[in-house]
Image (spheres, grey):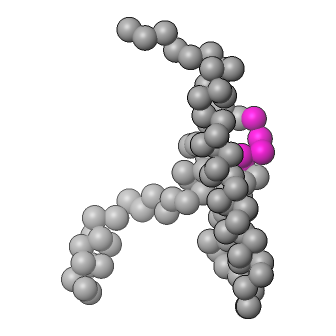
Amino acid sequence: MPIPLDGPEVLNREFLEIRARLLQIAASLDRMDRAAGTVRSDGRLQQIQRALAILQGSAADRVEQIQLVFSRPYEANWKATFARDRTKS
């Protein structure tokens, strides 16, 4: 069984990929800012902003918190709703 990597090893292995992803996010946000029209009230942008705020924290469950930001709330009757949605197509 392999020995888990320690923090510095994980940072060494992941740094360039993390850096590239952050640059990609920054570029996308810059393009939205420069584009005509506003998306400030768009719920998707608000989700992105909430996810970025979570990333700034130090909680051990950031990935779970971010997944919940982008997830639909649980609906007990989801099977019936899904079946109804499929018949509309």
Report which quarter residue 61 is drawn in: top right
In the foreground, 39 or 83: 39
Q: Residue visible at 69% across and 52% down?
A: 22
Q: Is residue 55 magenta?
A: yes
Q: Is residue 68 magenta?
A: no
Tag count: 0
Q: Residue visible at 60% across and 43% down?
A: 17
Give the magenta range.
Answer: 54-58
The answer to whether residue 46 of the structure is visible from this angle is no
From this view, report whether residue 88 is shown above or below residue 4. Answer: below
Residue 54 picture location, percent across and down? 72, 48
From this view, report whether residue 75 is shown above or below residue 19. Answer: below
From this view, report whether residue 71 is shown above or below residue 85. Answer: above
Left or right? Give the position of 68 relative to 22: left
The answer to whether residue 89 of the structure is visible from this angle is yes
Residue 14 picture location, percent across and down? 60, 34
Q: Quadrant of the C terminus?
A: bottom left
Residue 34 picture location, percent across and down? 77, 81
Report which quarter residue 40 is drawn in: bottom right
Left or right? Give the position of 53 relative to 89: right
Report which quarter residue 11 is drawn in: top right
